[in-house]
Amino acid sequence: MPKIASRLSGFTESVIREMTRVADQYGAINLSQGFPDFDPPTELVAAAQRALEQGYHQYATTWGTASFRQALARKQTRFMGVEIDPDAHITVTCGSTEAMMTAMMTVCNPGDKVIVFSPFYENYAADAILSGAEPVYVPLRPPDFTFDPDELRRAFQQGVKALVLCNPANPTGKVFTLEELQQIADLAQEYDTFVLTDEVYEHIVYAPHKHTYIASLPGMFERTLSCSSLSKTYAITGWRLGYVIAPAEVTGGVRKVHDFLTVGAPHPLQHAAATALDFSDDYYDRLLVDYTRRRDLFLGYLDRAGLRYTIPQGAYYVLVDISEFGFEDDTRFCVWLAEEIGVAAVPGSSFFREPVNHLIRFHFAKREATLTTAGERLLRLKAAV
Ligand code: GLN
């Protein structure tokens, strides 16, 4: 029997996706893999139905249909404060998952080093390894999950090609401050590296925190590949619409990789989603009001259950400390939680490079009724262990 590629032994299957299977197996409420159980805006669904009737059944232009890129350029110019050109800067991908993989393959040669903050969304290490690159981990330390600037500088001194920045961050809910972003930007310029962002939670940032796009800092657009998607902002994770925004000189490379990976994102859905990209500010204000309410509802249950956690500043995840329950293995705790309490979470160890196994991650992108049922179940936790 021939052997499959040895680079696959450098990472495991996604624990996040595995926990969804565990949730399904035990019929648990799935607060593990982060996706909503509520519908996208009705206008968007209607636009998708219309798009299917209008005959967009064949491939779109590989880097994205013009109407979608134009609408995206208008929206991102508005929010990023940088002039985004639909033809020179944008490549539409199958979700930000492909955007990140494409960005990584565009900038990395085999053997290159890439800085990844730990804890991190598990895809980044896999993206680096599949690109032949080697992750260099820099810890983000609790309680505010900030980095030590000297430690970050030492990582840059190893001759890195790029840094991955997830902001707002999954799984910590951290929103990087302007000062932290400036430190990263200064080092990226000093050591002449790229920054690859994952900004899928760009519109889910709780007051008083604010999202700054690192590409908008002086000197950074030229070296940043900004990756994001419509999944979280419009509750359409299954539509698989993401994108890379890159400087003109890099976009040709991004498009080349993207074309050979997937050819293109779903054509009718690109047409439909242009509708959402033209939503007014009211939509984003409402989105935030809704997520703030979900967050506060769920955190209220964690308080009542006597659980310790880090308050999320952005995104829709919360890390909960389970050290008091005496489980040696956070994965076993999560399986037990799904089976006995009926709520699924992701073991924190799948996000950390360091041997951390006293944290689990819940997400709260769910209807209030779902969060209430999950919260009521968690109230039984202490007595059940
Ligand atoms: N970002 C989501 C999470 O962390 C999942 C995305 C995915 O599974 N593709 O749970």
Image (cartoon, grey):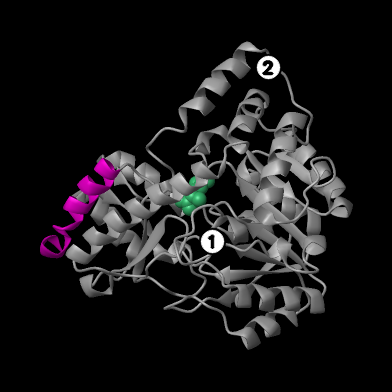
CB atoms of marks 1 and 2 within 8 Å: no
Q: How many marks?
A: 2
Query: Residue 215 bears which disc, if any?
Result: none
Residue 181 locus on image (x, y percent): 64, 72
Figure check: 241 above or below 322: above
SS assignment at label 2? loop
Q: Amino acid at mark 2?
A: His
The quarter of the rendered structure image containing the C terminus is: bottom left
Query: Are there few (<14), some (14-19), or many (20+) residues within 10 Å of tag 1?
Result: many
Q: Which residues are magenta?
A: 368-385
Q: Nearer the viewer, residue 71 or 190?
A: 71
Q: Amino acid at mark 1?
A: Pro
Mark 1 and mark 2: span between their CA atoms? 35 Å
| Residue that protrudes farthest toward the left in the picture | 383
Residue 113 locus on image (x, y percent): 73, 70
Q: Identify the residue at horizontal 40%, vertical 50% (top origin).
A: 289
Name the residue beneath numbered marker 2: 57
As for residue 372 lying within the magenta part, the answer is: yes
Figure check: 105 above or below 223: above
Residue 70 locus on image (x, y percent): 75, 36
The quarter of the rendered structure image containing the N terminus is: top right
Residue 62 locus on image (x, y percent): 78, 32
What is the quadrant of residue 20 in the picture? top left
**Residue 294 vs residue 226: left or right?**
left
**Residue 341 vs residue 212: left or right?**
left
Name the residue beneath numbered marker 1: 168
Q: Identify the residue at horizontal 26%, vertical 50% (top origin).
A: 343
What is the quadrant of residue 334 in the picture? bottom left
